[in-house]
Image (cartoon, helix red, strand yellow):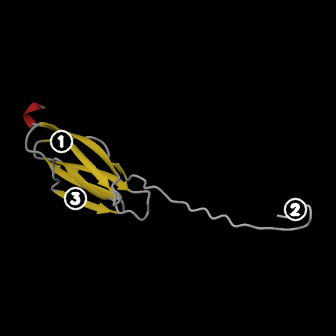
Amino acid sequence: MRDTAGFTSSSTLTIDITGTNDAPFINPGPDQIVFVGETATITGTFGDPDLADTPTLTFDFFSPTNVNFSNGQFSADFVFGAPGTYSVAMTVADNHFASAQALVQVQVFDFLEV
């Protein structure tokens, strides 16, 4: 900067930007309808917008018989032994304690009900 007398001065401004943790996401796909003993396969995506975070997916209440993970996609198989409506809850959490939940309803019918 130059003043009217021709003198100059300069200064330095430092700005520190501190990011905040973004919550992970989960997209579990549609609800399922199966018969007793058949496999309900829930497929979806999950991840975290913060590239340094490692998201972890867990299933609440029911344990899948088979789970596959690949590049932010998952598939999980469930088999129910009785008719009814089951809520399969999923939670994805990152290593900074942020999380997201999702729910898929699985309707299970008995062959005799149809």
The picture quadrant where one finds residue 88 is top left
Which residue occupies 20% across, 53% down? 77
Residue 28 seen anywhere in this rendered image of the structure: no
Q: Do the residues under discs 1 and 3 have CB atoms within 8 angstroms?
A: no
The amino acid beneath tag 1 is Val
Q: Which mark is residue 34?
A: 1
Q: Which residue is mark 2?
A: 3
Q: Quote the CA–CA distance across marks 2 and 1.
A: 80 Å
Give how far across and how far down residue 70 sits, in percent.
Answer: 32, 63
Which residue occupies 17% across, 54% down? 64
110 vs 48, nearest the viewer: 48
Which residue occupies 29% across, 57% down? 74
In the picture provided, is 20 more to the left or to the right than 70?
Answer: right
**Quadrant (top left/top right/bottom left/bottom right) for the N terminus:** bottom right
75 vs 59, nearest the viewer: 59
The amino acid beneath tag 3 is Val
Closer to the chain start, of discs 2 and 1, is: 2
